[in-house]
Each structure stands twice: as structure tokens, then as C-alpha cells.
Amino acid sequence: MSGEKALAALRAELPEPVLLTDPGSTGRFAHDEAEWAPYGKPLAVVRARSTQDVVTTVRICAELGVPVVPRGAGTGLSGGANAVDGCVLVSLADMDRVLEINPREQLAVVQPGVVNDDLRAACREHGAWYPPDPASSPWSTIGGNVSTNAGGVCCVKYGVTRDYVLGLEAVVGSGEVVRLGRRTAKGVAGYDLCGLFVGSEGTLGVITEITVKLLPGLRAPERTVVGYFDSLVEAGEAVAAVAAAGVVPSALELLDQHCLRAVDEWKNMGLSAEANVLLLGRSDTPGAAGEQEVDTLLRCFDEAGATWSARSTDEHEADALFAARRLAYPALERLGPVLTEDVCVPRAAVPEMLSRIEASARRHDTQIANIAHAGDGNLHPLIITPPGDDAARERAQRAFDDIVDDAIALGGTVTGEHGVGLLKRKGLHAELSPTVVDMHRAVKSALDPAGIFNPGKVFGDPDA
Amino acid sequence: MSGEKALAALRAELPEPVLLTDPGSTGRFAHDEAEWAPYGKPLAVVRARSTQDVVTTVRICAELGVPVVPRGAGTGLSGGANAVDGCVLVSLADMDRVLEINPREQLAVVQPGVVNDDLRAACREHGAWYPPDPASSPWSTIGGNVSTNAGGVCCVKYGVTRDYVLGLEAVVGSGEVVRLGRRTAKGVAGYDLCGLFVGSEGTLGVITEITVKLLPGLRAPERTVVGYFDSLVEAGEAVAAVAAAGVVPSALELLDQHCLRAVDEWKNMGLSAEANVLLLGRSDTPGAAGEQEVDTLLRCFDEAGATWSARSTDEHEADALFAARRLAYPALERLGPVLTEDVCVPRAAVPEMLSRIEASARRHDTQIANIAHAGDGNLHPLIITPPGDDAARERAQRAFDDIVDDAIALGGTVTGEHGVGLLKRKGLHAELSPTVVDMHRAVKSALDPAGIFNPGKVFGDPDA
């Protein structure tokens, strides 16, 4: 009923190519890449062209109590952007203009639909650098990155999306447009509401413009080191040793045999014959200090039992290895529905966590591939099931739950960079105390009193 | 009446040296170092020894509706820790233990009363570095630094307190103890409530434990460059030029003639004979890249019209100059009550803002000294009035208001690092839209429904 009214009101305000209502067109916006997460049937999709389109949509939905689910490119891995039944999906993908790149003030202003790699390329042209580099950077949008507080490969040294968001424009529950944060290097006027919106997964409003911090200058060239290991745990020990040695690499990535084989089967790179587990380390520190870091990385690899380790002397080879890392996820997806983990544990606990992940795979007779931003303890065990095998799916879900429990037991978190979305709601309730969950609910109702923004996500009832 | 009841309940739970009630003892806790900010008469002071003492206090105060005002060392400069009439001041200064320093996980866990310099010294012993270095670092506490999101000298390169807070323990409005944030390198489970507490100036709860991020290794040695300028605006142009050149110095501080003379009169350092305005730059980048940065700084100084500039070859001399910078504020305080500004403007606007500050001083016939974290556009014009001269105080207040307006007009913020407290409430309302102020109020009531924590501060009515 309110759905009908909302559709009529939206039709009166928004033209046809902006407002999509037939299920054939809306369906492809209905979910992100979390293959295991459920999704509902949207009432409509608004492909916003401007902040005004968002205001129009939010005003109508707020008045009629219709849920609003914002989405970027839909590359999320936890179901955060999935449709709930009867919602209006607001796609920000068409708001894709870079509005300003200002190297002097070390900032850029972008619309939320700008693709991560496009922003990075635009910054390069101005002699500046936007560091956050999620593996999805060729496709994911800055708006999505901000909403999930996305991490990435160089985050081990340069921090995550949150560390680069200076200011936001957003449409809030009243349909009003607010500006949060600042353009200056520092600022403490009031609560960090800008930071509160970062990682809030669309539950507090719709972000319509983002001011990000840039680093001056182009990124320094990187040296790459490669280590082959017989076992996950030995590779994990190398990771812990790097942390103990006080080196902060500009990347420290792990791929196991399952990933290497999946990439080989797809791209024929011949990686899986070489190693059971691959560690890729990088240093971008200039000069002698960088050389020392490389030496330390190699020493840590060797002392942890690497079967082979070397500094890559061939830039193309090094780039190919990192490309393989980026391809690992889509390569695995070709084998069947992937249930994606995203736990993050203290660096010293990486070997133990990897060992527990292997134990989970054995215990539940399921296949678990491992990719990891190993240097910051952010592990992505990927649980793969044969298509259509329901028993395997149940075993996979049990392995997933065990991994979440193990991460919490080791002092970790249930999600390092993907967000809670739908898949990690149970984990969130296990990680946070009931009082802290209540604080979340109180903040949510304070800022979204009608409860229209992405209802049920993040701290919603996982059994609902 | 509720005051009497609260006192009786506190007396029943807390022993004498923890609970202070006679005005002779409580008075010295009643305000911070913002000499112009009003303060009320506290009901009592609780010198908390433990989280439990804070829980006891908050429970009693919440039940009886008695205001709770947390405070650290009382070195704040905006009245944020000032007593409101009939409040219980909770001093965290005695909770001063460093609980853990963990270089491998790059973190430390401290009680809120740990003095900034003490934490930094303890980290050094473990081969790690806690960067945030407010000028008050010999006295101010980490709890106070977190509550105000304090900046400092090296923040131009290394970021502010917020960038180093991983997790918090706090006592919230219900009297419950919550843990916010994490110990891992990354984590996105739920809203960044930890970040929300950073810079919340005691309005959301009482912080009782803090987990901070450390950088591995000892800090690299710094090279210092010194520039003398005839005018503030020329020095400001040098600052803007440094930003435009894409150099991020590890410090870029400005002191004007008033500061230099005040330091000379106190410590007889002979600085004011040398220059009208002093710029102090530093680079801690190792190797040839650092040498280049020094060259660029000098070139920027010279091209902006420095009357003299040089790289300091004498480490003691360089340290003495930075010590003078640290002494400037107390040196000026010796001359009369200081009304402290803390605006932050875009880097390119530094010359214009300095010129407007000079115009304000002339227009209102008042003396304004300038210290600045110039490299991030964070200016501290300090308005000095002769003791007891009421007309001068009125003129000073008008200059203060004009400076706030000018900062906003130039795209800046009313407070870069000191916080809003009492002094910048009018500025906050000028800077933020009414909708954003309403969002603040909604978040505040969501997390502090009884309204007991530091009432009237930050977004309170400035005319109340």
C-alpha cells in the first residue's frame, strides 16, 4: 500500500531512466557479490544523477516508511547492499564525477560513484596519491569503499579508507542534506559524525559527496619479495616474524595452494607447481632503509622455513604475482559459490589462526582456500562448495561459524574490511557486548528515527 | 537536595582521599587553563583510582541527575573540563599506569591519567613511538588528549590523537562499562563508536582505559631549518609554498615577535632581536630524500622573502628553538590573561588568515601574539589583555569573534585541536548547520539519556 504510494510519488518526480520499476531491470541491482547472503525484491531502483534525486527519494520514502538501501558498484562481500523486500535501492554508480583534485590542500572531492582506480588515476595526473586499494579497486566505488570502510593491499602501511575521509555530504533521515567533517588538515568542532558515517554500511543516510585526503607526490616505486612455503602455518610464522622485527611492509599478502591452482586453471600462470603457500611482500621505503626492509623480510621468510625466497628483479613478474592475488577471488568463484570470511586477528596470532582454519576445514570436511592481507592479520578464508550440494553448504556454514568463534577467541574481530552486512550479524553480536549493541541501536534511531536506511543490516537480528 | 543525597551516597562508597568535598580542596580542580572561560562550584571531586570508582560515581550521579565532569590534568584551553555548578568532577589523573606496551602488535594500553611524555618515554624503552605531541605533552594526560582529540607539533606529518586510538574502555550513562574499538590492525564490526568518543570532550561518558597504536622503531632523527621573516604574511606565504611544493615536513611552526619577546623576557634567549617572525621547519625523512626536503623548505622560505634562513647544524640550538616554541604560551600567560584562539584554515589561506588576524588586532586595538602549527594551517592567535582592564577584555572578545568569522569565511574551522569546550560554542553554531547540531544533540541524548555528562559544553547554548 505504502509501496504503491511511494511508486506513484517517485514516478511523479523522477524520469524513466532514473527510476526503474520492472523486475527485469531492478533484479540486477538486488544484491552484491556475497553469494551466500539472502536478498529481497526491491520496489524500485533509483539511479541517482544528483544529490537532489537522493533528497527526493529519501523524502518520499521517509514519509511513507519505505526502506532505502544505498549501493555503489555492488562489489561488496557481506550482503550489505542487498535489497530488502519492498525497498527502494538508491544506486550512486551514476554520480561518478571527480569534482576537485587539489594537491596543495592534499584533498580531492568526488561523487560517490567514482570508481576507486579512476580516482587513483586522476590523482596521479595531479602528482598526488590516494592510497586505499581494495582488491576490488577496478570496479568498486569510493562511496562503497567509504560505506564499508574498505581496506586493501597497501593498508598495512598506509591505513584504511577511514584514514582518508575528511568530509562527507549526506542525505539524512529527514531528507535534509548535511555536510560533515571538513576540508582543513585538522578540526575538532563537535563529534566526528563524518567518521561515524564511514563504515556505517548505509544505515545512517545516503552519502552523496566525499572529500578525501591525498598524499602529496607520486607513490614511490616498490621492491617485491617472494617466499614459497610448504605450510600455511610456516607462512603465518613468517608474517608474525615480520611484525616482531618492526618492519612495516607496503604489502604482505598470502595465497595458498587452492588460490594458486584456481588462478592457474583460469589464467595458466604456472604458480601452483612452485609452492603450497605464497607470501608476497613489498617495500616502498626509498634508499638504503628500503633495502634493509627487503633484507629483513627475506630473513623472516627464511627463518620461518621458506622453501624458496627471493627478491624479484623483474618488475613485470612482480606485478603479475600481485595481479594473481587480485584474481584469486574471481578465480575461486568459478569453482562454486564462495562463502567469504574476513576475520582480523593480532599479528602474532596469525599462525595459530591459520592452523585453526585448517582444523575447521578438516573437522567439517570442507574446502577452504586462503587469501590474506597477512601483514595486518586480516585473513580471508574462502569456503567453497560444489554447486547444488546442500549438505556441503551446511558443513561450510559450520566451518564459517567456527572461524568467527576462533577469531574472537584469539582477540580478533569478525570483520576486518568487508563489513558486517548480513553475513556477519551473528558474529557482531558475539563480538560486541549487549550494551555496545544497544549503543548502536540508540545511535541508529537517533539519526534515522523512521528506521528507513538499510533496515536489518549490521546489528539487526541475524535470525529474523 | 539531590546534591545532598549524592554526597551521602558517594561518602558511603568512596573513602576520604578519593572523595573531596571541602571547597578548599575541590576549588583547584574546578577549571582548566582557559583563563577566560567561566566555571562553577563543584559539589565534589572524585579522584578515581579505578574503573570501579568511576562506575560508582556515575551510577550515583545518573540516579540523582547530578552532572559528571571528567578531567585529566586540566591543561585544556577551552574550558571543556570546567566545573558546572553542583557537578561531581571525576579526576582521572591518578589512574596513571601504563598497562601494556606491545611493539609486536604496535599498540599500548594505558589508563587515562598517564602523562603524554611518560607514555612516549615508556614506548621509547620498548623501541616504539607514540607520535601525538601536543605542546602540553609534559603535563597533559592521554585521557585528556583523547577527549579533545589533541594535535601537536609532528601532527602535520603523523596525524592527530584520533589517528592513534584503537580502542577504549568507558563508563557510559547507565553506569555500565563498555569496550569500544579493537586491538587488531583493522576492524569494521559496527559503528566507529570508539572514534565517536575521541574528541567528544567528556559529553558521552568517562574514558577509563585507552588502547593506542604505536609506530614501530624509534623516531628518526630530524633536520631543522630556521627562517626569519619581517612580516607574518611573508611567513604565511612560505607555509603555503611548502604545501604547494608537496613537501610534508615533520614540523612547521611559527612564532611571532610577541612570542619571541615574551620568551626572551622570561628565559633571556635573545630571540626577538633576530627576527620579527620565526618559522621552524623539520624533516625526519631519512637519507637523500630528507636532504631534498630541507632544500625545498629553505627555497620556500627564501622565495617568500625570508631575511635569513639556514639549516641548523647544532642539534642543541635546534632543540632550544623548539623549546622556545613550547614555552611561548606560558611566557605569554605571564603578561596577563590570554584568550586563546585555535582556528584551522586551508594551507593556501594561511597568509590571508594571518593578515586578517593583524587587521583584527588593529581594528580592536588589542595585542595579538601568534603561535601556529603553521604547516597544517592551525593558527593560535593569542589575545593578551592587561590584568583588570575590562574595556580591553571587551575589545579582545570582539577580536576573538572576528577571527572565528574570518576562519569560517576562508573555509576553515573554529577549532583545530583544542576542542569547543565553552569558548568556541558560538563558533560551533556558526560553523555547523542547525541540522548537524541537531544530529549532535540526538547522538548525545541517545548515549547519555539522563544528560549527566559535561552538560552545556560543546554544542550547549553559548548564551545560557
Image (cartoon, coloured by chain):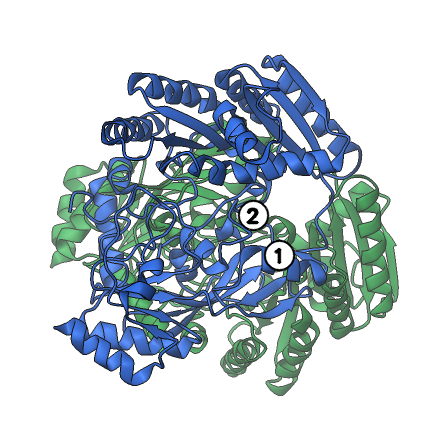
Chain colours: A green, B blue
Q: Mark 2 points at which residue?
A: B133
Labels in figure, total: 2
Instruction: Tell me: residue B323, above or below residue A358.
Output: above
Instruction: Pick out the residue farthest to the bottom.
Output: A363
Residue A307 visible in image: yes
Q: What residue type is labelled 1?
A: Arg
Residue A456 visible in image: no
Instruction: Write down the chain letter for disc 2.
Output: B
Instruction: Tell me: residue B228, above or below residue B327.
Output: above
Residue neighbourhood size for the residue with mark 2, other residues' Cα within 10 Å, grouped as few (<14), some (14–19), many (≥20): many
Residue B414 location (% of width, % of height):
35, 36
Q: Are dots 1 and 2 on a single chain?
A: yes
Residue B111 location (% of width, % of height):
50, 68
SS category of the residue bearing label 2: loop
A186 vs B463, left or right, is right
| Closer to the camera in the image, B58 or B204 | B58
SS category of the residue bearing label 1: helix
Q: Do the residues labelled 1 and 2 touch (CB within 8 Å)?
A: yes
Q: Distance between the residues labelled 1 and 2?
A: 9 Å
| Closer to the camera in the image, A396 or B4 | B4
Q: Mark 1 points at which residue?
A: B120
